[in-house]
Image (spheres, rainbow, N blue to C red):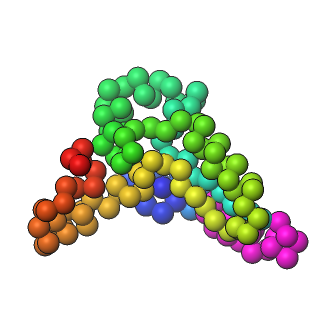
Amino acid sequence: VCGEVPSTFLGPYCAAKGGLESLVTVAAKECARLKIRVNAVRPGMTRAAGVTSMFGETIMRERAKELIPLGGPGDPAAVAEAIRFLAGADWLTGQSIAVDGGSELAFNRACDNADAALFGKTWPAPWSDAV
């Protein structure tokens, strides 16, 4: 997400992520003539061994539930499933797939709130628990 959406205090990280996005597309274009496909997976907040302590914090669990439309952090198996898909997709190159439970969708709340103010609140906010 940080490659496309700036995040305060994470400038170098965001720049690195943006560079990776560009690398995927450039490498895909350069390698296509050799029939080499280049794709990437952008994992969102995932319950992985390296970040176990982060999910012990109440604020992180609450924030994850708030920011991820599918209800919280993902599982490494979901990321592996996306990688398997890309590995078998013969007609797909230059793509970067977000495997993030929809968290990229939640970053547009300012627009969602403005639309609700303009058009009414007949639908629940996309990030709410209302069905």
Residue 75: x %, y % from top left: 53, 36
Q: Is residue 17 visible?
A: no
Tell me which residue sits at (60%, 37%) in the image.
Answer: 77
Q: Residue at x 32, y 61 (%)?
A: 108
Q: Residue furthest right?
A: 34
Would residue 35 appear left or right of 101 to someone viewing this image?
right
Residue 122 placement, left or right of 3 = left
Q: Is residue 131 above or below residue 53?
A: below
- Between 104 and 27, the one nearer to me in the picture: 104
Residue 107, quarter of picture: bottom left
Q: Is residue 86 visible?
A: yes
Instruction: Please say if 114 is above or below 71.
Output: below
Q: Which range of residues does the magenta coloring cover?
A: 19-36
- The part of the image, by quadrant, that contains residue 55 is top left
Q: How many marks?
A: 0
Image location of residue 4, percent across then percent down = 48, 63
Is residue 93 shown left or right of residue 72?
right
The outermost residue toward the front is: 131
Q: In the picture provided, is 124 more to the left or to the right than 11?
A: left
Determine if the magenta segment contains residue 32. yes
Residue drawn at 35 percent across, 32 percent down: 61
Give how far across and how far down residue 88 sits, in percent. 75, 56
Q: Main secondary structure of the magenta part?
A: helix
Magenta stretch contains residue 118: no
* Rendered residue at 44%/38% (across/down): 73
Residue 126 picture location, percent across and down: 28, 55
